[in-house]
């Protein structure tokens, strides 16, 4: 009986999910040894594989590099024609082959043995040539491929990809790789925007509208108009004492021009640290229905101002 596309898709997912669960249950202490070995690498982690294993290997290398473990992918065919020079004695190599008998890997295997470059094998076959030559072996589950012919690399590549993710995350945690470092490696796109801090986009110095508590309201209005944020910080020395917004002006229209800034200001205003994520500051502005927020340090000293448009321009929405 021919299965529907939906039934086939569910069957594929179930097959691959079962293999992932099997791999998780059988994963042993060898991964601890692999992580310890890779942590000690002074150079790069070089990943290689042929065909679909190569495509997965390129992704593993990219994930390692973006999470604090310098890595690169070297194509085994190119390695045999000069790119072996990319693999040095300071590196470690991860070779991927489901069968463990991929002939295109032979030159890289020989190179690692000749120059004593640590080599990790990812393979389904513990008795293979690759496994026999490796310093460490991470085994894929002996599980069927998900296609009807049981031939197309499906389950094996999914498991390899997941094992690479597990290795990258284990290394990431062992290195103490934090969100600030992650942000440094992901400056572009939505992900980079979500990791921006207030300090990265806030207005500072002369851009900040500010007056003293004794400033006449006429001069205060000029400062608000000149800076164009619809607000002004009331500052004593370098400490933020209060904030005047358009709303404060409306609430104090009666006799406004006879008052001083300190009399009109809202005391103890909502502020943020320059170190918090910009997306958190945007959340506070949305919650309070305000368009600007001042940033102060732990001592209450004024450091900057963020307008909601700054967040939008940075891609935080």
Image (cartoon, rainbow, N blue to C red):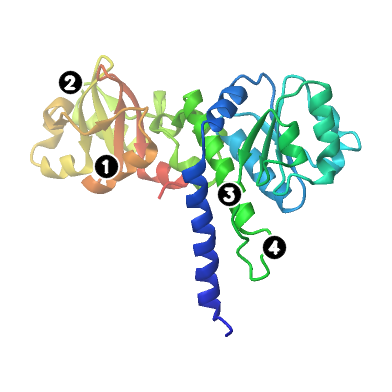
The residue under label 1 is 284
Relative to 128, does residue 223 appear above or below in the rendering? above
Residue 297 as seen in the image, left or right of residue 141? left
The secondary element bearing badge 4 is classed as: loop
In three-dimensional space, the C-alpha distance between marks 1 and 2, rounded to whole angstroms, equals 30 Å
The residue under label 2 is 214
In three-dimensional space, the C-alpha distance between marks 4 and 1, rounded to whole angstroms, equals 51 Å
The mark tally for this picture is 4
Residue 59 as seen in the image, left or right of residue 109? left
- Nearest the viewer among 182 and 205 is 182
Q: Residues within 10 Å of mark 1 (few under 14, many from 20)?
A: some
In three-dimensional space, the C-alpha distance between marks 3 and 1, rounded to whole angstroms, equals 48 Å
* Quarter location, residue 67: top right
> How far across and how far down the image is residue 74, in percent?
77, 38
The secondary element bearing badge 3 is classed as: loop
Q: Residues within 10 Å of mark 3 (few under 14, many from 20)?
A: many
């Amino acid at each position: 009986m021919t299965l529907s596309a939906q039934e086939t898709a569910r069957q594929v997912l179930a097959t691959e999910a079962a293999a992932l669960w099997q791999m998780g249950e059988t994963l042993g202490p060898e991964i601890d040894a692999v992580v310890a070995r890779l942590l000690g690498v002074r150079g790069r982690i070089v990943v290689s594989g042929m065909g679909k294993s190569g495509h997965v290997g390129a992704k593993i290398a990219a994930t390692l590099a973006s999470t604090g473990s310098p890595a690169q992918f070297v194509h085994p065919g190119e390695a045999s024609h000069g790119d072996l020079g990319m693999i040095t004695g300071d590196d470690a190599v991860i070779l991927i082959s489901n069968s463990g008998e991929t002939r295109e890997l032979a030159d890289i295997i020989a190179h690692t043995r000749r120059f004593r470059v640590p080599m990790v094998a990812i393979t389904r076959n513990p008795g293979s040539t690759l496994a026999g030559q490796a310093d460490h072996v991470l085994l894929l589950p002996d599980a069927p491929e998900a296609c009807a012919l049981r031939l197309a690399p499906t389950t094996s590549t999914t498991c390899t990809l997941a094992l690479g993710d597990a290795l990258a995350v284990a290394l990431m945690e062992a290195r103490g790789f934090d969100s600030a470092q992650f942000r440094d490696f992901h400056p572009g796109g939505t992900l980079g925007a979500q990791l921006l801090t207030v300090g990265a986009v806030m207005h500072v110095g002369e851009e900040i509208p500010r007056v003293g508590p004794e400033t006449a309201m006429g001069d205060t209005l000029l400062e608000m108009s000149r800076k164009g944020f619809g607000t002004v910080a009331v500052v004593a020395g370098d400490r933020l004492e209060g904030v005047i917004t358009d709303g404060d002006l409306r609430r104090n229209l009666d006799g406004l021009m006879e008052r001083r800034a300190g009399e009109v200001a809202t005391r103890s205003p909502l502020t943020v640290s320059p170190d918090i994520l910009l997306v958190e500051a945007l959340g506070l502005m949305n919650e309070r229905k305000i368009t600007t927020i001042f940033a102060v340090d732990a001592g209450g000293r004024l450091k900057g101002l963020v307008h909601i448009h700054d967040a939008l321009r940075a891609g935080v929405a």
